[in-house]
Structure formats: C-alpha cells, structure tokens
Image (cartoon, rainbow, N blue to C red):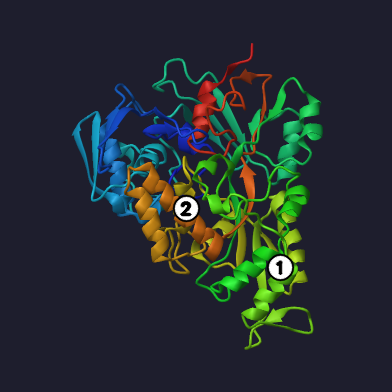
Amino acid sequence: RNFNPYNPSVISGTPGLIYETLLYFNRLDGSVKPWLASSYERSSDATSITFHLRKGVVWSDGQPFTSDDVVFTLGLLKKYSAMDLSSITPFIKTVSAPDANTVQVTLDKPFYPLLWYLGGQTYILPKHVWSSVKGDGSQYADPNPVGTGPYLVKSFTPQLVVLSKNPKFWQPGKPEVTELKIPSFNSNTSAELALQKGQIDWTNLYIPNIQKTYINLDPQHNHYWFPASDIVMLFMPLSKYPFNLLPVRQAISSAIDRSKLDSLGESGYEPPAHPTGLLPYNKDYMAPEYADLKFTQDPAKSEQLLQGAGFTKGSDGIYADKNGKKLSFNLNVVSGYTDWITDCQLMATELKAVGIKVNVNVIAFDAYYNALQNGTYDMALLWTNPGPTPYYLYDALLRSTNSAPIGQPASSNYERWNDPNTDALLNQYATSTDPTVQKQAIIGLEKIMVEQMPSIPLMDEPYWYQYNTSKFVGWPDQQHPFAAPGTATYPDIEYVVLNLHPAD
C-alpha cells in the first residue's frame, strides 16, 4: 500500500490522480497548461520563475492548498536527494512564498529546463501531513494519501486499487468518471484476456496482432493508438569491465538485428531506433550528417571489433580476454514483459553467434529496477525518459549527477556515463534561452551517442494505449493528441481522465 509519488514502488496512477503538479505539459506537442498554478512568469535570463497559485484549491481533507505546501515540497527534495527524481535542487538558489498564492524560485545560474521539471514533474505534497513524516521521505509508504487531485483511495488490496471521486476537487463537475478500478495482473497475457472480455476500458499493453485480437472483437468500441514515446535501450554499467571498452559495446550493437526485434518481438510496432537516440517527433534537431544514418547488423564487424580489442575465441566459440575472462553476461528482463523477453532471447542468440554468451535473466520488477539503480547488473533492457525536446532524454540518460557509484542508487543514468564534455553540452542547452545555441548542444550530444555509444538504442517504443468507448468517450487519439495516452504516463493520466464523459 504505497501512494508516495517519490517512491519507485508507488501504486499506478497516484502521480496525477491523487497528487498534482503546478503545470501540465503535453509531451506530444510541448504545449503548457496552467494547473495548480494558474499562471507563471519566467525571467528573460531564465534565473527565476514565479508561480501564481490557483485560488480556492483545497487538499482532500479540506485544508487549503497554499504556497507553503510548494515551499515545503521543494525543501524535502533538497533535504533528501532520493526524492529529487529529476535532480533539480542543485540548480535552485532560493524558494520563497511572498504570500499564500505566490511562489518565487531563484537560481544561481540560468536553467531553462527547470520549468518542465519543477512545473510539470514535481508533485506537490501537503505540508500539514508530510511535516510529521520522519526521515527520508522517499522511503515513506504514504498509505493514506491526502492530495489535491480528482481521486481518493476508496479501497486497497494487492490485486485491486479502487479510487473514488474527490468531492473537494478544484475543477467543478469533474471528474465525470466517479470511480476508477486499477487491477493488478501478473502478466501481459492475463491483462490481455481481461481486455478482450471487455473487463478493462483503458490500458497500456503490448498486444501481438492487435487488429485481429482486440479491434475486430468490437470495431465500434475497441481502439488503439501507438504514438512514439521513447527509446528502448540496452544498458550496461560502464564503470564495470568489459563494458567500459567502447569496442565491446560497438560489437554488441553490431550483432543485433533491430528489425527482427521489431517484427518478431514487437509485432512490427517498434521500428529500429536512430543511432542518435532521437525520436521521430524530434527530427528538427537532427544533425544533417546523421539524417540518413541507420543501424545495420554486421556479425563480422562485431568479431573484428572484439579481436581488435584483444579478445580471442575459445574452442567453445566464446571470446575471452588475455586473462581468460570470458565474455559471458546476464541480461536482465522483467517477468511478464513477454515482448521484451522475446527481444532478449533473440539478442542472446545473435550475440552467441559472434562469441558473446548471454543468459536471459527473467526477474521480478522490483529486483530488476533495484539492480539498475544500484548498477549491480551486466545488461538490461529499459525505456528512456523523454520530454518536450531531446534535451530531457539525454539529460536523464547521460548527466553525471544522475549517476552514482556502483552500489548506490542512480536516479536515471543507470549506465553510469560520466563525461565532462557531455555535462558541458547539457549545461550549454540548459543555461541558454537561444534556440540556436540549444540546437548546437543537442547536435553535440547526438555525436556522443553515435561515436561513444554510452547506451545502445534498440527501438522506438510507442505509448502502448488501448481504450474502449462503450462507457466513456473523449479519449486522446491521432486527431485529438491532447495528452500522452496510456495508463503509465504521469501526470498525463489525470488529463486524460478529466477529458472523459459518459458515452450516453
């Protein structure tokens, strides 16, 4: 029973449906909408932001929402770095509340992306409740949450969470969906069965052959939309031998047939990623010299790279270094992620063919995520964290302050890339308000991705998103892309629910 938006094991839907942000960003087009803040101003040099809070908002226990809550939340993030999921507090100089409805944030130096992280990704907590929480707030389970969002916790079991309409919610007449049931499934297969039976209205599943297995069952009401969301990457801890060797990473990449992962593992929904790690909707940032660049499978090149790096093939067909240490690794994947398990098995076969032995290690999500955070893994498949421009994906993936020594939790740089030039380019983007200077920084980061391969891009992952219109209408779709769809994108999940109304 964990409703803490700052804990990795938080119950699905908590961020957005119970706890809210100051602003709402539509990741699909970069537009910004006022939320708990009714307006904001950013200084022309990007060294301060003033938020004007919406008047009349109350917490679900009836206490008024004020600037004190915002100041308190940011204070917690500064005090406990594990709560600072976007690593923003090092940039913040002061946070003050001139009055009950105004918050001023000043910075030591310009940091342009702060608005997205602070306005769109920071969940405001009630001071009158959380001030009594002892110690690191990221470890608190928050079993009885008090939020400003549209829902309250009605009941909880590990199998089913039921949320009911918050009668004190600040948007009059909303939500029109008075109750949300969030069931837990132990695999894609069992969830897909429930979807086919009409027991689920909205989900984010990978479903093979979706037209036949879902849409055709009820073409009038069953729908899907898969806009590009992020990049699935192959992660390796770079501070660990032999992943610190670029030729080893390049050899691994070169052995993989990404179009086979797409067709056999992902039913053709996940085209091969671009070597820069740019998503299709970020094409404006692409360096001209990389526009036609593609990944190609080349097993002979993989073996050349390994031999060039001093590895020799043993009688068992597996390469080893001069000390006899074999290229033999575990590849972690989450049990129940049936498509990713197939992807990993395909890659293991391809890597074995070039002399790298890979054991596909299927484990529970908590163990998998813990190993990623702490760097106690060999290889793992994982999604990335995009934002309105390529900066956000690169920042989460590559900034050294988002990393940590092996054995300590990293916030998002799970491959432990630590490079002053990368940090300088990220800072060039972040401290400028000039789009040309920002684009030059992105192009520099593309070069690092292509030439140094800190992480290996595999496929463009879509927002998995299926929905049924028999009970409710108003869903996002290709004609109405007002929010990132699917049930696993926060706080967008709230924006979707608030747009729904009964079909009749």
Residue situated furthest front in the rendering: 289
Q: Residue at x 47, y 19 (%)?
A: 174
The front one of 362 and 429 is 429
Q: Residues within 10 Å of mark 2 (few under 14, many from 20)?
A: some
Q: Nearer the viewer, residue 286 or 338?
A: 286
Which corner quadrant of the image does residue 118 belong to? Answer: top left
Give coordinates of residue 396: x percent, y percent. Answer: 46, 53
Residue at (56% x, 21% y) in the render: 500
Work out how far the residue at label 1 is from the one at label 2, CA to CA, in angstroms. 36 Å
For label 1, count other residues whose C-alpha is less than 10 Å away and answer few (under 14), some (14-19) or many (20+): some
Of the residues tagged 1 and 2, which is closer to the observer?
Answer: 2
Q: Secondary structure at mark 1?
A: strand
Pick the residue in front: 381 or 449.
449
Kind of residue indicated by mark 1:
Asn
Number of marks drawn: 2
Q: Is residue 55 depicted above or below 41 in this figure?
A: above
Relative to 267, residue 447 above or below: below
Residue visible at 43% across and 66% down in the picture = 418
| Upstream in sequence: badge 1 or badge 2 | 1
The answer to whether residue 357 is visible is: no
Q: Quadrant of residue 321?
A: bottom right
How far across and how far down the image is residue 22, in percent?
Answer: 36, 33
**Quadrant of the image occupied by residue 470:** top right
In this view, which residue lies farthest toward the left?
Answer: 98
Secondary structure type for disc 2 = helix
The structure residue drawn at horizontal position 61% and vertical position 65%, both measured from the top left corner, is: 379
For residue 166, above or below residue 456: above
Report the disc number at residue 443. 2
| Circle on res. 359 | 1
Residue 492, which numbered label? none
Residue 489 can be seen in this image = yes
